[in-house]
Image: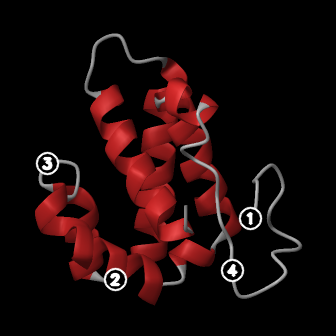
Amino acid sequence: MEPVSMILAALAAGAAAAAKDTASTAVKEGYEGLKALLKRRFSGDAGSEVALENYPQAPTVWEKPLEHALEETGAAEDEEIVQAARTLAVAADPEGAAAGKYTLNISGGTGRGWCRGITTR
């Protein structure tokens, strides 16, 4: 999974899980933490902020604008954001994580220096 896809998947899984009364504290905090990191990265870019806020309610509508925002702002290359997304995805969907759904693929470089705890292919 590419970093942009990882972030989008984590936001979707986190929003769905956090909306349930049975969601763990780790999922709720992870979701809010990832959103806070992204809001900080998107600060001042109203379009990106709107896409982030609306993505969980209408992912098919907001996926492309949010994907564009992640790429344009460098969020998809931010170690802290990508790691937070992976941590959230694993917490929100442990079965998917066990099946390798959240394996991060990095291409076009060595990936050294920011891939702690992330499997690369």
Residue at x-position 70% and y-position 66%: 79
- Nearest the viewer among 119 and 64 is 119
Q: Earlier in the sequence, mark 1 or mark 2?
A: 2
Query: Looking at the picture, does residue 16 appear above or below residue 61?
Result: above
For label 3, the crowd category at 10 Å Cα-Cα, with few meaning under 14, some 14 to 19 and many 20 or more, is: few
Which circle marks residue 107 in the picture? 4
- In front: label 3 or label 4: 4
Q: Is residue 73 left or right of residue 102?
A: left
Name the residue rendered at 43%, 42% in the picture.
32
Which residue in the protein does label 2 denote? 68
Give the alpha-carbon distance from disc 2 to disc 4, as whole Å: 19 Å
Q: CA distance from mark 3 to mark 4?
A: 31 Å
For disc 3, the marked residue is 57
Whichever of callouts 3 and 2 sits on the residue coming sooner in the sequence is: 3
Label ID, residue 121:
1
Across and down, in percent, residue 48 comes to 29, 76
- Furthest-top residue in this view: 22
Q: Earlier in the sequence, mark 3 or mark 4?
A: 3
Q: Amino acid at mark 2?
A: His
Q: How far, Cα to Cα, is label 1 from label 3? A: 32 Å
Please name the amino acid that badge 3 sits on: Gln
Q: Secondary structure at mark 2?
A: helix
CA–CA distance between discs 1 and 4? Answer: 8 Å
Task: Name the spot of residue 28 as percent of width and height, x first.
Answer: 43, 29
- Element type at mark 1: loop
Q: Are marks 1 and 2 in contact (CB under 8 Å)?
A: no
